[in-house]
Amino acid sequence: MSDFVKDLMAQVKAKNPSEPEFHQAVFEVVSSLVLVLERHPEYRKEKILERIIEPERVLMFRVPWVDDQGEVQINRGFRIEMNSAIGPYKGGLRFHPSVNLGILKFLAFEQVFKNSLTTLPMGGGKGGSDFDPKGKSDGEVMRFCQSFMNELFRHIGSNTDVPAGDIGVGGREIGFLFGQYKKLRNEFTGVLTGKGLNWGGSLIRPEATGYGAVYFAAEMLGTRKQTLEGKKCLVSGSGNVAQYTVEKILQLGGKVLTLSDSNGYIYDEAGIDAEKLKFVMDLKNVRRGRIKDYADKFKSAVYKQIDPSADHNPLWDHKADCAFPSATQNEVNGKDAANLLKNGVYVVSEGANMPSSIEAINQFIDAKILYGPGKAANAGGVATSGLEMAQNSMRYSWTREEVDNRLHLIMKSIHKTCVDTAEKYGTPGNYVNGANIGGFVKVADAMLDQGIV
Ligand code: NDP
């Protein structure tokens, strides 16, 4: 580790104690950026890196609401406005009991580079709450969302900060949040993305993150003159990203063997086909059930519980060609990475944000597999949110094919940026360096242009 990285990380840890995920995200990016700083002393002189790791603004607020039993509940709400050098803050809202300041800061930090890579003019932000929508009635979710927006509305706007969904925030939650924003502001504006199709949403936005991660995998395979046809794939999660990852893999001729939730995972030897995927979508999006039900319904599948305290996740210990981590951060640790490599996996395309630990990433890079880090591979979601903003500004909607084509082109462009940048900085095939440096330079140059603000 260079002295510069060591000193900077010591400062980050001292200034942001108890935020291990934020330290991890900063370390991964800063380790790549050493290559750029050597060539661009102006970034060092103007303290671009020191400034980019400090959020422009952090909002933290009380979210009180009343449950179905008439009990008062109190959650904590956050919005991290990380960087607006190249556009309004943009990034999702996460509702999950594990949410805290450090997790949202890591997500907001990643978002800055990801948004820059998309080629669209979007800054980086992230927000959410420790509220758990699981097991709550629609009425409880609505009252929580309304209370959350009662504070958030004064900080966001279509030219200021445009939140979207993330874990625990899908179409239902975006609807309740938008309704309350509209009521408070008395204006109909593109202040959130992931909206319903009848009220300003974009076709393909629900599909975009998963589709994008698969397009990215296909591009990586293309560098070895291969396609997804016949490839065996492991997918984790069973939410928005996982579902559309499966759909696109099937369309491109691959075979999907696994899906999971926070309780366990299913392994379906026969493959998860379109019919079975339909069952999963109904199970997760309508009935809001558990993935275990899949194995009760389809006899070709087995269900196994996942023990979060175990030293590895058995989902990653099956013979396959490709892996699409699509659940949450640090779901692939060093041992999981070793299992993936041992089982023949040579493509990893991250639908989730920072799903691989630093130990896992180092193994993927050393093994020279096709490893697409989340900030590149899952950028299709926010890119299509950017397309939703463009359509809202025009008061016009593109067709499904138009949006999908643009998404596909953006994923190709992100892939090319990663490949070209990695090559330019002397680390060919290293998508981590490609994504980190490719995303950084545009934001850093904008910050130089705009002075010390
Ligand atoms: P969803 O809420 O739709 O689904 C999340 C899935 O991951 C569920 O199956 C959930 O299981 C599982 N999961 C969540 N937390 C944990 C945990 N701590 N341990 C194990 N499993 C867990 O979220 P999304 O599909 O939208 O998001 C998945 C990932 O993709 C996240 O990392 C998110 O940041 C990232 N992402 C999402 C984008 C989007 O457009 N939605 C864009 C870019 C990245 P359970 O139901 O049991 O909680």
Image (cartoon, helix red, strand yellow):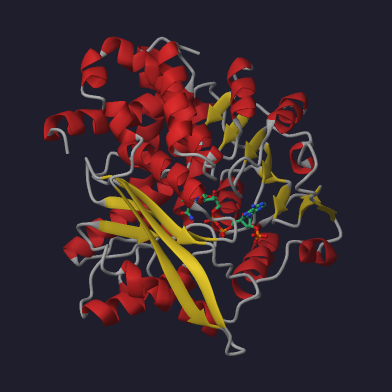
Relative to 176, residue 396 above or below: above
19 relative position to 250: left or right: left
> Which one is nearer the viewer's eye here, 373 or 123?
123
Instruction: Locate residue 15: give its quadrant.
Output: top left
Question: Residue 181, how many percent across, how many down?
Answer: 30, 75
Which residue is located at x 49 percent, y 46 percent?
A: 102
Q: Quadrant of the C terminus?
A: top left
Which residue is located at x 24 percent, y 51 percent?
A: 88
Relative to 9, residue 395 above or below: below
181 relative position to 281: left or right: left
73 relative position to 92: left or right: right
Relative to 163, residue 369 above or below: above
Answer whether residue 364 is visible to the viewer in this image. Answer: yes
Relative to 99, residue 178 above or below: below
Which residue is located at x 26 percent, y 27 percent?
A: 48
Q: Quadrant of ligand 1?
A: bottom right
Question: Residue 271, how many percent across, how many down?
Answer: 74, 49
Question: Residue 139, how many percent across, how many down?
Answer: 53, 85
**Extreme-bottom residue of the structure:** 70
